[in-house]
């Protein structure tokens, strides 16, 4: 029996599924991952772009970098894997816990999404926390213009610096999100980890929560992650191929006519 067939069989007898996703989930939508060849952290120091200290050291650079990423997200569309995950909601209770900040799960129709690392389409002022004024998208029209140095995006209320509403290294996760993720994973019969290197805590600890509560655990990745041996099963492949196949097999089994 293949790992996919075992997963289909487990899903048939389950009522709840929790899914952890990482950057690999969005790769086929054209959004780069962090640690793969050519990924965002290959040539960049993560701390200079994704920490409060890095931001304060060079806010214009950090704002511009996030404006470029924001434009990529706004141009991207959910792929067939995102849609398949959303479709699983018609078969069982699904909670998607994502490290991605692109909002593609919700755009694909998933209704129960916990964004562990925030959302790049939102922003706030580091001084007064206002999140209603113009965001970093005001820079996206200028990021292409060679030689132009777009100015800082500042709060229209207090003049403070505007930053993306994403979680940076050393910061707390959005209030309550991780405890809700732990609760959902602890209550799940099946836990999937899709497109993540499992290298960032605390997302990487959810596998233990799943295991200690007796869930069947499966990693779906183009290459086994450092955590692959901790899962009951691994499916090697792209999210955009594996997930639609999974849904189609689940449905064909469910709807197969009974034989006597
Ligand atoms: P990584 O870049 O660390 O890992 C991406 C994973 O996706 C790798 O294991 C790839 O093998 C896999 N992958 C690539 N393409 C895939 C595809 N089409 N289908 C399935 N798998 C694929 O990204 P994350 O694990 O998400 O944090 O990184 C975790 C966190 O580190 C991010 O949320 C970000 C980063 O620093 C913050 O910004 C706070």
Image (cartoon, rainbow, N blue to C red):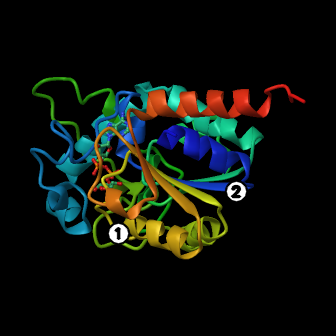
- Residue 104: x and y in percent read 51, 37
Q: Residue at (38%, 62%) from the top-left corner? A: 167
Locate residue 55 relative to residue 232 in the image: left or right. Answer: left
Quadrant of the drawing holding the C terminus: top right
User: Quadrant of residue 210 in the image?
Assistant: bottom right
Q: Are marks 2 and 1 in contact (CB under 8 Å)?
A: no
Q: Is residue 103 visible?
A: no
Q: Residue at (56%, 45%) from the top-left corner? A: 6
Locate residue 175 relative to residue 125 in the image: left or right. Answer: right
Assess disc 2: are there few (<14), some (14-19) or many (≥20) residues with their C-alpha within 10 Å of its C-alpha.
many
Mark 2 secondary-structure assignment:
strand
- Residue 206: x and y in percent read 47, 67
Q: Is residue 51 visible?
A: yes
Q: Is residue 182 above or below residue 62?
A: below
Q: Residue at (52%, 32%) from the top-left corner? A: 81
Provide the residue designation for mark 2: 16
Q: Earlier in the sequence, mark 2 or mark 1?
A: 2
Provide the residue designation for mark 1: 201
CB at disc 2 and ligand 1 closer than 8 Å: no
Assess disc 1: are there few (<14), some (14-19) or many (≥20) residues with their C-alpha within 10 Å of its C-alpha.
few
- In terms of depth relative to the viewer, which is nearer, 113 or 84? 84
- Residue 54: x and y in percent read 18, 62
- Residue 27: x and y in percent read 35, 34
| Labels in figure, total | 2
Mark 1 secondary-structure assignment:
loop
- In terms of depth relative to the viewer, which is nearer, 57 or 234? 234
Locate residue 209 relative to residue 67 in the image: left or right. Answer: right
- In terms of depth relative to the viewer, which is nearer, 95 or 56? 95
């Amino acid at each position: 029996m293949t790992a996919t067939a075992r997963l289909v069989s487990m899903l048939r007898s389950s009522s709840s599924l929790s899914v952890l996703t990482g950057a690999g989930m969005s790769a086929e939508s054209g959004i780069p991952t962090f640690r793969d060849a050519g990924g965002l952290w290959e040539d960049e120091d993560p701390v200079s772009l994704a920490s409060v200290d890095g931001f304060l050291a060079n806010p214009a650079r950090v704002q511009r970098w996030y404006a470029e990423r924001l434009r990529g997200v706004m141009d991207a569309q959910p792929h067939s894997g995102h849609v398949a995950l959303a479709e699983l909601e018609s078969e069982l209770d699904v909670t998607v816990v994502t490290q991605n900040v692109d909002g593609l799960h919700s755009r694909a129709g998933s209704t129960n999404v916990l964004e562990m690392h925030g959302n790049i389409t939102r922003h706030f002022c580091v001084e007064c926390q206002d999140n209603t004024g113009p965001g970093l998208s005001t820079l996206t029209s200028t990021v292409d213009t060679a030689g132009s140095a777009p100015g800082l995006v500042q709060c229209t209320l207090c003049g403070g610096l505007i930053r993306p509403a994403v979680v940076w290294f050393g910061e707390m996760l959005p209030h309550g999100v991780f405890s809700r993720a732990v609760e959902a994973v602890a209550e799940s019969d099946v836990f999937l980890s899709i497109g993540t290197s499992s290298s960032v805590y605390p997302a990487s600890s959810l596998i233990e929560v799943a295991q200690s509560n007796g869930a069947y655990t499966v990693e779906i990745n183009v290459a086994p992650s450092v955590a692959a041996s901790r899962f009951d099963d691994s499916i090697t492949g792209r999210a955009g191929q594996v997930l639609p196949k999974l849904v189609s097999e689940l449905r064909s089994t469910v709807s197969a006519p009974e034989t006597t």
